[in-house]
């Protein structure tokens, strides 16, 4: 199963909104076939492993990181392939929460007379597919808040200069993560001040998986439609219904997809935005700035994880990494758990899961 989980990682950034899946066929203690789901629309892991194993599949054990699918999608049901191949036993790490499967694959295999075991290395399988699981269970993407800041918590100087606070190793790491996720979001102020592209650059071409869809959160459409990010294929701007109709037409005429939302407390409720993103098949999203958007995302309770790149610089007065959170009592502060740190050149990457003191409601 460990081998199957390692194989599954080969699909990172290439199979969403499908899950990452790896499969290994074992006959008489030897691996006779293996495979992974490598690209959306192509053969699933089980099918690749069974093709490789060929006749050696008969009576063998199939180890797979997720319950085999039992429905027709872009490819035929994997359960049918498993049964036809003559597999005798299936060991899967976890059930698939997708309502089109949700135990149906396991039932079909058992009804066909196969022995099925579920739960081997379940925790590792859940970690691997945390974005897929959140999306299928809640309809929202898994959200990472990424910050690149000085040691004293600034993302720019008082003049607005922000390039580059962190070093090249940190930038390469950020772009590797960009290539794994479905979308990347920034606020209007970031577009106005930095004119970013929000694509994947600081990696060798062979290591680039894809560019995430850019989303600019810009309630009143202050950003210029000619900004570089809006020239990107699939660019989205999230605006309030109250934004100028003329400005909305300007963005639409420039080929930008305009998402419109009702106003809550003077701004877009980011839970509405992530729900729309989820309905569009986005299972993962990185928020990259600025401070107001970071604070809004935390206030709205949409952030699942933070990735904070801390550079050995002291800026003093400047732009805060996170805006006002209205925290008065310490026991109401947002907590970070499962904390890990990693050196990236002279910088320190601080990664942690977000735990809110209570639901926003």
Image (cartoon, rainbow, N blue to C red):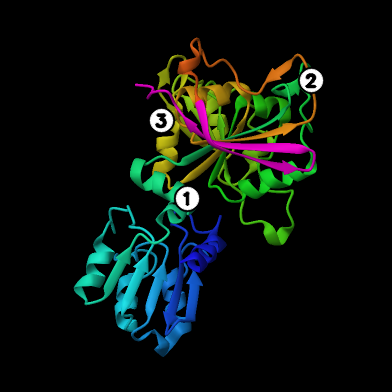
Residue 207 visible, this orientation: yes
Percent x, y for residue 223?
63, 26
User: To which residue does mark 1 refer?
Assistant: 127
Front of the two marks 2 and 1? 1
Secondary structure mostly seen in magenta is: strand
Do callouts 1 and 3 mark residues in contact (Cβ within 8 Å)?
no
Viewer-nearest of discs 1 and 3 = 1
Residue with the mark numbered 3: 272
Q: Residue furthest bottom?
A: 55
Q: As drawn, is 58 to the left or to the right of 296?
A: left
Mark with earlier residue (3, 2): 3
The residue furthest front is 29
Query: Which residue is drawn at the image coordinates 52% and 41% (left, top)?
Result: 285
Q: Residues within 10 Å of mark 3 (few under 14, many from 20)?
A: some
Residue 215's disc is none
Taking the image as shown, residue 171 lies to the left or right of residue 178, namely right
The residue where tag 2 is placed is 315
Q: What residue is at 55 percent from the left and 22 percent from the top?
A: 295
| Residue at 41% from the left image edge and 70% from the top image edge | 63
**Residue 343, magenta (yes or no):** yes
Residue 356, percent from left and from top: 44, 26
Where's residue 244, x and y in %?
51, 20
Residue 156 percent location from the top left of the image: 74, 23
- Is 354 included in the stretch rendered in magenta? yes
Which residue: 32% across, 52% down?
97
Single out the mark in the foreground, 3 or 2: 2
């Amino acid at each position: 199963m460990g081998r199957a989980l390692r194989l599954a990682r080969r699909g990172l950034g290439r199979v969403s909104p499908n899950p990452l899946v790896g499969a290994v066929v074992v006959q008489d203690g030897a691996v006779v076939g293996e495979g992974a789901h490598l690209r959306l629309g192509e053969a699933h892991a089980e099918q690749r492993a069974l093709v490789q194993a060929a006749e050696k599949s008969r009576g063998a054990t199939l180890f797979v990181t997720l319950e085999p699918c039992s429905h027709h999608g872009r490819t035929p049901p994997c359960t049918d392939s498993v049964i036809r191949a003559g597999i005798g036993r299936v060991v899967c790490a976890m059930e698939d929460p997708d309502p089109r499967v949700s135990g149906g694959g396991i039932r079909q295999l058992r009804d066909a007379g196969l022995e099925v075991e579920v739960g081997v290395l379940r925790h590792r399988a859940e970690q691997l597919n945390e974005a897929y699981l959140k999306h299928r269970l809640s309809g929202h993407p898994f959200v990472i808040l990424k910050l690149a800041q000085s040691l004293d918590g600034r993302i720019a100087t008082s003049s607005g200069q922000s390039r580059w606070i962190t070093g090249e190793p940190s930038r390469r790491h950020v772009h590797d993560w960009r290539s794994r996720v479905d979308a990347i979001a920034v606020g209007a102020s970031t577009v106005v001040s930095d004119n970013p592209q929000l694509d994947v650059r600081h990696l060798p071409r062979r290591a680039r998986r894809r560019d995430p869809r850019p989303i600019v959160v810009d309630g009143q459409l202050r950003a210029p439609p000619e900004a570089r990010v809006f020239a990107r294929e699939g660019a989205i701007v999230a605006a309030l219904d109250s934004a100028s109709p003329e400005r909305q037409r300007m963005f639409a005429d420039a080929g930008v997809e305009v998402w419109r939302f009702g106003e809550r407390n003077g701004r877009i409720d980011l839970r509405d935005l992530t729900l729309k993103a989820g309905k569009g098949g986005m299972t993962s999203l990185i928020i990259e700035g600025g401070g107001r958007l970071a604070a809004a995302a935390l206030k709205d309770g949409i952030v699942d994880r933070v990735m904070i790149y801390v550079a050995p610089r002291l800026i003093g007065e400047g732009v805060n990494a996170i805006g006002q959170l209205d925290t008065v009592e310490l026991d109401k502060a947002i907590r970070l758990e499962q904390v890990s740190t990693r050196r990236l050149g002279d910088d320190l990457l601080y990664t942690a899961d977000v735990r809110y003191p209570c639901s926003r409601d």
